[in-house]
Structures are given as structure tokens and as C-alpha cells.
Image (tube, rainbow, N blue to C red):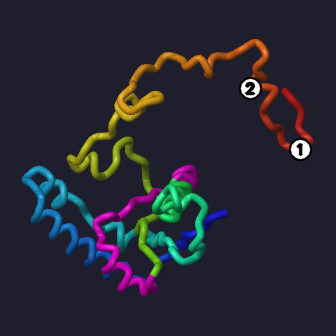
Amino acid sequence: MMQPWNFMIIRDLEIKHRAKQEFLRANEEAALVSEDEPQRLYQSLTSEAIEQAPINLAVTCDRSRRPHVPGRPTLLDPDLFVTCCAMQNLWLAARAEGVGVGWVNLIAPSAMAGILGLPAGIILVGYLCMGYVARFTDASTLETAGGESRRSLESVLFYDRWGNRASETHPDERPTDNAPSRRTSRSLPRGSREP
């Protein structure tokens, strides 16, 4: 099993302050090179969560942990992809427990590597702010600040070939008389019975 990720819990207020300053620097730089509409978006983003969230979490990928990773000949960066999956799993688990998570992606990884003391070969994949929230919103912070809206499932779903939006059932997906039912094929916990 490939586990190239590390989770670094940031509690130190000085590190949080430096992360906030890096966000402000990167945000200002991004606003200067952006067109008018995105510039307003960048100016509306705030950094309070970096210092106010009880937990900041740096998610890193150790590229040297397993130099001969299965899949590397066909995928260039499977260790980075797996690290992103671990981060999303953490995010989904946090949300299920009522913990809010925000990804601070306007931070230069090289600057944060210096702030966090990351050695060579350790890559910052994500910087997260985590804590209990009063309520969850239906839209992301970027969307409510005027950024791009969430795309519909239909706009990002294709069948068999790029651009094919046909949604009819494929012949291989049609139920047959000899196919096991979902009811009989599921696993039950040890000692439990079918209802």
C-alpha cells in the first residue's frame, strides 16, 4: 500500500501568522496580474481562518518514501494523486463529524516549505484550516465571493468517449435473470442476520 503523505498539525501561533502573511502576499500578487473581475474576487478573500481556526494542517507528500511506486511508468505522479485522495478522505470524514475544512491554496509552496522547515523531497500539497463551524453553506467561499459556480453533474459526465453525453443504459449494465440481487450480494457484519 502506498502512503506517501504526512499530516503536520500547526498549533504554533507564529507559524499561523507567517502563513497568513504568505497568503496576503500571494493574494496581492495574484490580484495585480488578474483581470478586473478576478481582481475583485481576490480582494474579497480573507485570511482570518488561518489564525482563527483551531487547527491548521499541512498535507505533504514524501516523494522518497517509495521510489519504485506501482503505476509510476504509466502515471507520472501517483504519489501526489494518492496524497490528494488522503486529503479528500480527511475532508469528508471531518465534514461528517461537523468539522469545517478550508483549503488555503493562495500560498506559495516554496515559501511555506521554508516556514514549515520541510526537507528536500517533501512537497506541500495542501494547507487546510479546520474547526467546528456554526453552519455549513451550500456554496464554497470562492463561489459566494463571486468566483466560478459549481458545474452540474451533467456538464462533467461523459459515457465511453470524451464528449458523449448519452445517458441510456449500456447493454452490459442491464440486469439479467441470473444476476445476483443487491440484497444477496452484500456483506453483513459477523453475527447479524438478514432483516
The residue wearing badge 2 is 182
- Please tell me which residue is depicted at 35% across the width and 31% down the height of the picture: 155
Q: Position of residue 141 (x, y in %)?
A: 31, 52
Residue type, mark 1 in image: Arg
Q: Is residue 150 visible?
A: yes
Q: Label 1 neighbourhood size at 10 Å, few (<14), some (14-19), many (20+)?
A: few
The front one of 49 and 112 is 112
Quarter of the rendering containing residue 13: bottom left
- Please tell me which residue is depicted at 35% across the width and 29% down the height of the picture: 163
- Please tell me which residue is depicted at 89% across the width and 38% down the height of the picture: 192
> Which of the marked residues, 1 or 2, is nearer the chain's N terminus?
2
Q: CA distance from mark 1 to mark 2?
A: 18 Å
The front one of 78 and 124 is 78
Secondary structure of residue under mark 2: helix
Q: Which disc, if any, is residue 190?
A: 1
Nearer mark to the viewer, of 1 and 2: 2
Residue type, mark 2 in image: Arg
Queried whether the magenta region covers residue 170, the answer comes back as no
Secondary structure of residue under mark 1: loop
Horizontally, is 169 left or right of 36 in the view? right
Looking at the image, the residue that sits furthest to the front is: 73
